[in-house]
Amino acid sequence: MRVHTAMTTLALAAVFVAWPAGAQDGDLARGQEVYDRWCASCHGFDGAGEGPAAAYMLPRPRDFTGGLYQIRTTTGGELPTDDDILHVIDEGMPGTTMPGWQDQLSRADRRALVAYLKSFYPGFETFGAPEPVSIGRAGRASEDRLAEGRMFYDSIECWQCHGGLGRGDGSSGPTLEDDWGYPIRAADLTQNWRFSGGGSVEDIYRRILTGMDGTPMPAHADLIDAGFMDEEQLWSVAHYVRSLSPERVPRVREVVRVERREPGEVPSTVHDERWEDVDSFYIPLVAQIIIEPRWFDPSVNTVWVQGIHDGEELALRLSWSDRTRSPDPEWSDFQARVIDVMEPKEGDPVEPGPLPDGITLQFPTNIPDGTERPYFLMGDSRNPVYLWQWRSDQEGVEAATAQGMREIQPLSGRTIDVDAHWEDGLWQVVLRAPFTAEDPRNEVEFEVGRPIPIAFYAWDGDHGEEGTRGSIGSWYFIHLEEETPAAVYVAPLVAGLFTVGLGLFVIARAQRRERLSSEANGHEEVSTTTTA
């Protein structure tokens, strides 16, 4: 259930071409041709999950020779149906490097691929097709049902892996590994759009009921069989887990709107109540796989950004999930295992050790007039960038200039205030600074009404990340709202009064016409009577 990374490109290394249609279900020869071309680089030609690209991935690609499949509609320990396998081929595995192939391969080719994947494990032939589990209906969520779901979430100890608020920071986290001995992270339940197998209530229910074979996620059907809970109560757990994520998949917006407040109303702490009604913007992050040593397994996949200014000062609140406040000694063994598995394939070896969490904000040194921006990996010699660098092991924020990820120079300039807080798997950091720069040649000067490029980098120290090994994002913009002119408030009032006046005029005119028409009809009736 972890984030897609740019490693997907290794699986898509060749240019896609359209295969001829006509492959039939069970066409092993055709399935092998498709597999060898598109799948073997990760899963290996023998299906054991050890292709040449596998060493760059965590979790490792699926080993098809053991018959263990995470995403199934069948009971725990059972084989998947053909449609289950096809579903994963079509949709991929969100949160891993497995992409979806529905738009690249024909349905006939994908069906042939299902048949070929099954040939790696004799049990498909021996045991026959399993029956899917009937799960019934989810029903509607309610406050009582969510409360019941939270109660059972605690009683069946989901928190041990997923944490009290679902961010994957549970006490068992440092010990988790898959069936092949590789370290694995518990899912962040606040990001359902990244769940392998889907993020709906029904999908979640099925994962809880049947488990995810090959991972530490167990099946809970035995709790129903034992009478500890019933199906409706398990549905309540599924509803509660779904409630931990936003109602809708967050939308990526290129412009982060920074709200304008009155002078002196810019917050300086993460818990200031003024943040509660400020819009939050979703910024996805991916693996840094461009500059050596590269890192294919980023821990931080999202940062949420809020902003407030008063025309003189700017404050940004950044929030992101992080399972630990690094460095955490309890996670040192986990870090060592990750580094051992994901050791960079170039450069000097990485040694385990205490590393901090961190986040860096990047700005151009001057606001560009057009859409041109510096190189997103901290600029270059022609277009340097201005950085705000925060680390969990130091006080304050370090400003710097950079001409690339390896060419960073500290800068003494404007004062940047910081307030940082970690709790229940969530970092929140407020950075506050004046608009004006001490060194305008190297520091951006913020301006109201002009889009200002911004980019983000993040590191999880207990996941072995520092330097070039971390999560990166592309350029976005922050837009500092202008002061609302009085005309904005007066114009609607005038327009409203004009509309009301015009409406009264139209009504009065219609009534006058109706009165005149009635009088005319009355005269006509009198005239007719007199003549008679």
Image (tube, helix red, strand yellow):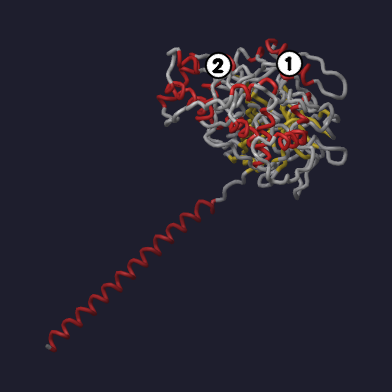
Q: Is residue 180 above or below residue 287?
A: above
Say whether residue 118 is visible: yes
Labelled disc at residue 49: none
Q: Quadrant of residue 281?
A: top right
Residue 284 falls in which quadrant of the image?
top right
Q: Which mark is residue 159?
A: 2
Earlier-in-chain disc, 2 versus 1: 2
Q: Residue furthest front?
A: 126
Can you say which quadrant of the picture contains the N terminus? top right
Crowd class of label 1 (few under 14; some 14 to 19; many from 20; radius 10 Å): many
Amino acid identity at mark 2: Trp
Q: Position of residue 272 (x, y in %)?
A: 56, 28
Give the quadrant of residue 505.
Answer: bottom left
In what element is the residue under mark 1?
helix
In the picture provided, is 70 more to the left or to the right than 364? left
Name which residue type carries label 1.
Gln
Q: Secondary structure at mark 2?
A: helix
- Residue visible at 42% across and 23% down in the picture: 232
Which residue is rendered at x = 16% and y = 82% of the image? 526
Depth order, front residue of 131/68: 131
**Where residue 407 sits: x, y (%)?**
86, 30
In the rendered image, the vertical position of residue 218 relative to residue 100, given as above or below: above
449 left or right, relative to 228:
right
Quarter of the picture holding the C terminus: bottom left
Q: Position of residue 6 (x, y in %)?
A: 74, 34
Q: Confirm or deny contact between disc 2 and disc 1 (CB under 8 A).
A: no
Disc ID at residue 335: 1
Foreground of the two, 370 or 273: 370
In the depicted structure, whether residue 383 falls above or below residue 491: above
Q: Residues within 10 Å of mark 2 (few under 14, many from 20)?
A: some
Residue 450, x across and y down, in percent? 69, 46
Residue at image location 78% in from the left, 35% down from the top: 386
